[in-house]
Amino acid sequence: MKLEGRVALVTGGSRGIGKAVVEALAREGAKVAFVYRSSAEAAEQIVKELADQNCEALAIQADVANKAEADAVVEQVIEKWEKIDILINNAGIIRDGLLATMSAEDWQAVIDTNLTSVFNFCQAVTRPMMSKRYGRIINMSSVAAHFGNSGQSNYAASKGGIIGFTRCLATELAKRGITVNAVAPGFIETDMTVDVRNAAGDQIKKHIPTRRLGLPEDIANAVLFFACEDASYVTGQTLAVDGGLTLGGI
């Protein structure tokens, strides 16, 4: 197992892409803590299912946009397992709407949950990782950072910000044995994208060269690459996992 002996922390880990990431990391031998906001029953079910597979997991309820709560999560994981080797910033929300009518609350909620949470958790793990001279940080961006989708100014801004943040942090931490990369999913079959998929129907697939939507497991596989030793010489990069959507060809 590629991640045996490693400790991982995943935000937004109780469903969708986050759940797939938690399960993939655990299957590769990592001890995995994951943060959830409100899905306590779903979170505990994941812990139970992994325990049945002889995998160790810990579910922690927290608001990722709250700096104090993020710090407390990191402290709790280190207290339990003595370190954090891998951080996956996956928590995210969508509050779509045209800018002319978008409320300040919808703008701020997306920025805080999607982008500020990345700052919160990266800052919290940086010193512990630096002291070990080892770390893998993977931030979840989106192909929305590259497209001008109507009604997604808040979401695109948050995901574009993650790419810039990732590159800067990678430069800061490279000498300490810590890599920082991002994954940019395309259209993935999750609860969060169901409204977009229902509205567009099969038209979406016509714009994807592989002619299919992605699965959470497709993203989890990319995360695994960045998390293991195979990617030790890769940092500051953003990998689009989108079936070729960003190629621009149909």
Image (cartoon, rainbow, N blue to C red):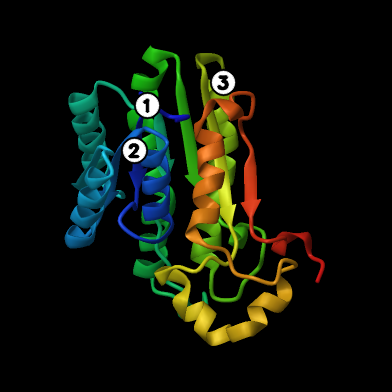
- Residue 81 relative to residue 177: left or right: left
Please name whichever residue, 73 or 172, is drawn nearer the observer in this view of the structure.
Answer: 73
List the residue tagged with mark 3.
Answer: 174
Local SS, label 3: helix
Location of residue 3 with respect to 93 vertically, above or below: above
Q: Which mark is residue 9?
A: 2
Q: Nearer the viewer, mark 2 or mark 3?
A: 2
Q: Residue at x 25, y 37 (%)?
A: 56
Other-residue count near label 1 (Cα within 10 Å), few / some / many at <14 / 14–19 / ≥20: many
| Type of the residue with mark 1 | Arg
Q: Quadrant of residue 122?
A: top left
Q: Residue at x 65, y 68 (%)?
A: 148
Of circles 1 and 3, the one toward us is 1
> Which residue is outermost to the right?
249
Judged left or right of residue 227, residue 11 is left
Position of 33 compared to 136: left or right? left
Q: Earlier in the sequence, mark 1 or mark 3?
A: 1
- Crowd class of label 2 (few under 14; some 14 to 19; many from 20; radius 10 Å): many
Residue 217 seen: yes
Which residue has dot 1 on it? 6
Q: Position of residue 239 (x, y in %)?
A: 64, 46
> Along the line of sight, which residue is nearer the eye, 144 or 4?
4
The amino acid type, in three-letter code, at marker 3 is Ala
Cα distance, mark 1 to mark 3? 19 Å
Residue nearest the viewer, comparing 52 with 7: 52
- Residue type indicated by callout 2: Leu
Front-lying residue, 227 or 156: 227
Which SS class for mark 2? strand
Q: Residue at x 34, y 68 (%)?
A: 105
> How far separated are the C-alphas under marks 2 and 1?
10 Å
Within the image, what quadrant is residue 107 found in? bottom left
